[in-house]
Image (cartoon, grey):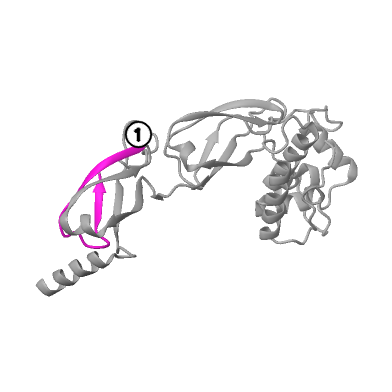
Amino acid sequence: MAFIDYYKILGVSKTVSEAEIKKAYRKLARKYHPDLNPNDKVAEKKFKEINEANEVLSNPENRKKYDAYGEHWQHAEEFEKAKQQKGYQQTTSEPFGSYSEQEFSDFFSNMFGGASTRGSGRQVKFRGQDFNAELQLDLKEVYTTHKRKLTVNNKNIRITIPAGIENGQIIKIKGHGGKGLNGGPNGDLYIQFSIVNHSKFKRDKDNLHATVDLDLYTALLGGELMVDTFNGKVKLNVKPETQNGTKVKLKDKGFPKYKKEGQFGDLYITYQVKIPTKLSNKEKTMIKELQKLR
């Protein structure tokens, strides 16, 4: 297995912080994202390398193993167990302790499918590496269940994204991680969703919130008002003498509930009474008359 310098791929030094790794990853991911580089095989390959590097270095435990074991970092635990079983002790600061070069070679030759030159040569099955990815979607896209095609390890997979998925939520796609070794099972793919909201609605889990302008006369006398919901308009009856900041609830007009088909949260409308401006002389006179009556 060829050594891959993940630090070099992200363009950072080995001493950088987690925050700097994350920053470098996001910058490069945006630059080489397939959506911004359609049919560009070089950019596609670079994007995959960037994601692979981030999967390892953004995880403190994996980063520690990678710094110590290089390309064999995924099997650090097996290697440590093998050392303990053979009675070896860690007597040096070198990454592989007191193993000789030949013993180290034999151990990993057996692990990666070759016949060992020592012992029985029995191969051990190893589970593949789990992959992590981030998928950015607009809030409108997760209002309904839809399918999306992703490219993982040069393979296209189609996933179903349920309506109502939340920002930061992670789903697992079983068996679509790294390939297992020696017949071991594949790892899993974990997708974290980043939901961007460009709508005028504020989301709070299954509920939505919006502010609606209400003219002074309708607020005073009552009447009807057409307001936007996430998927269309509805007519509201405004009560007379409605105060500024009054909140009304529109049941089942909120966001879909995750994996609960046909169930929705509520929409909360807050009225913002607008004071009229540029009054005519006649309007001012009438308001003064009203003021006298009050």
Q: Residue at x 49, y 37 (%)?
A: 141
- Is residue 238 covered in magenta? yes
Asked if residue 140 can be seen in this view, the reply is: yes
Q: Quadrant of residue 93?
A: bottom right
Q: Nearer the viewer, residue 132 or 229?
A: 229
Q: Residues within 10 Å of mark 1 (few under 14, many from 20)?
A: few
Please indicate whether residue 193 sits to the left or right of residue 4 in the image. Answer: left
Q: In the displayed image of the protein, which residue is found farthest to the bottom?
A: 292
- Is residue 287 covered in magenta? no
Image location of residue 79, percent across then percent down: 74, 43
Q: Residue at x 77, y 42 (%)?
A: 72
Q: Nearer the viewer, residue 81 or 3?
A: 3
Q: Residue at x 30, y 41 (%)?
A: 253
Classify mark 1: helix, strand or loop.
Answer: loop
Image location of residue 133, percent across then percent down: 62, 41
Image location of residue 154, percent across then percent down: 72, 28
286 w.r.t. 84: above or below: below
Q: Residue at x 83, y 36 (%)?
A: 1
74 w.r.t. 217: above or below: above
Image location of residue 4, percent across then percent down: 82, 43
Please indicate whether residue 32 sits to the left or right of residue 251 in the image. Answer: right
Residue behind mark 1: 260
Q: Nearer the viewer, residue 163 or 14?
A: 163
The span shown in magenta is 232-250
